[in-house]
Image: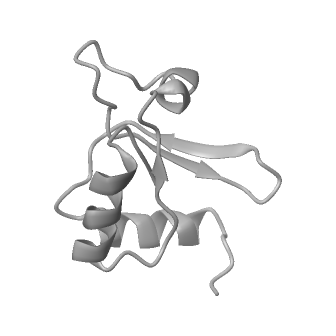
Amino acid sequence: MVSVDDIETNKKFAEQEQANFPLLSDADKKVAEAYGVLAPSGLAKRWMFFIGPDGKILHVETVGHTADAGEYLSKKLEELKVKKK
């Protein structure tokens, strides 16, 4: 997960949500710009990029999934045949 928030804000978020995945702080917004998700407001659009082990983008989801994010992610990963750990 990538966020344009600073490291301290992301750390608090990860602890609060008990995140068990990496969270990149993109405070200078270079990653958001590179992926084309930086909105005019300076915030990042909530797009999901599914990237394969070879570094290739498998799928881009541009529709926000907030209420059903976990369920959506699980189904999409299965559809993309991503191996479970």
Q: Nearer the viewer, residue 28 or 62?
A: 28
Q: Residue at x 27, y 12 (%)?
A: 40
Q: Residue furthest front?
A: 8
Task: Say if 70 sits above or below 58 in the image.
Answer: below
Q: Residue at x 29, y 75 (%)?
A: 15
Left or right position of 78 against 9: right
- Residue 13 % position (x, y): 26, 63
Quadrant in which residue 83 is drawn: bottom right
Quadrant in which residue 4 is drawn: top left
Q: Nearer the viewer, residue 48 or 79?
A: 48
Task: Say if 35 sits above or below 48 in the image.
Answer: above
- Residue 29 % position (x, y): 45, 27
- In the rendered image, which quarter contains the C terminus? bottom right
Q: Residue furthest left?
A: 67
Q: Residue at x 35, y 44 (%)?
A: 6
Left or right position of 55 against 62: right
Q: Residue furthest top?
A: 40
Q: Residue at x 58, y 23 (%)?
A: 34
- Residue 78 % position (x, y): 56, 72
